Image (cartoon, rainbow, N blue to C red):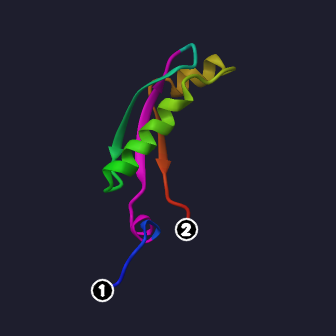
Amino acid sequence: STSRGLGDVYKRQRPAVVIFKINRDGSLHSARITQSSGSKEYDESCLEAIRSVGRVSDLSSQFIKEFGKGCEFEFKQKE
C-alpha cells in the first residue's frame, strides 16, 4: 500500500470559488461557496479567509458600485 500526503490530495482538488458582498463601509458579508473544491475542510478554510478580512478601507464609491453586489474569488492550490 502506498501512503499519500495531503499535498497529493490537494493537487487533484478543484479550485474553490467564494462569492461575497461589500458594504459601503468596506465590510465584507454574505460569503458563500459557489463551487466546492470537493473538500469540506478546504472550502471552510476559504470561507474563513474571506471572513477574516473583516473590512477593506479606502474603497472608491465607483468600486463599491461595481463590486458591492458581489465579488467572486477563486482559491487554487499552489503547485
For the N terminus, give its image quadrant. Answer: bottom left
Residue carrying label 1: 1
* Front in this rendered view, residue 64 or 29: 29
Asked if the magenta segment contains residue 11, the reply would be yes
Q: Identify residue type, mark 1.
A: Ser
The residue that appears at 48% across and 48% down in the rendered structure is: 74
50 vs 12: above or below = above
Residue 42 locus on image (x, y percent): 40, 51
Residue 33 locus on image (x, y percent): 35, 41
Callout 2 crowding tier (Cα within 10 Å): few <14, some 14–19, many ≥20: few
32 vs 30: above or below = below
Q: Nearer the viewer, mark 1 or mark 2?
A: 1
Residue carrying label 2: 79
The residue that appears at 44% across and 31% down in the rendered structure is: 20
Label 1 with label 2: CB-CB less than 8 Å:
no
Q: As drawn, which residue projects farthest toward the bottom? A: 1
Secondary structure category for the residue under label 2: loop
* Front in this rendered view, residue 33 or 3: 3
Residue 47 locus on image (x, y percent): 42, 38
Please give the range of residues in magenta.
Answer: 8-23
Q: Measure the alpha-carbon separation of dots 1 and 2.
A: 25 Å
Q: Identify residue type, mark 2.
A: Glu
Count of numbered marks: 2
Residue 61 locus on image (x, y percent): 62, 17
For marks 1 and 2, the one nearer the N-term is 1
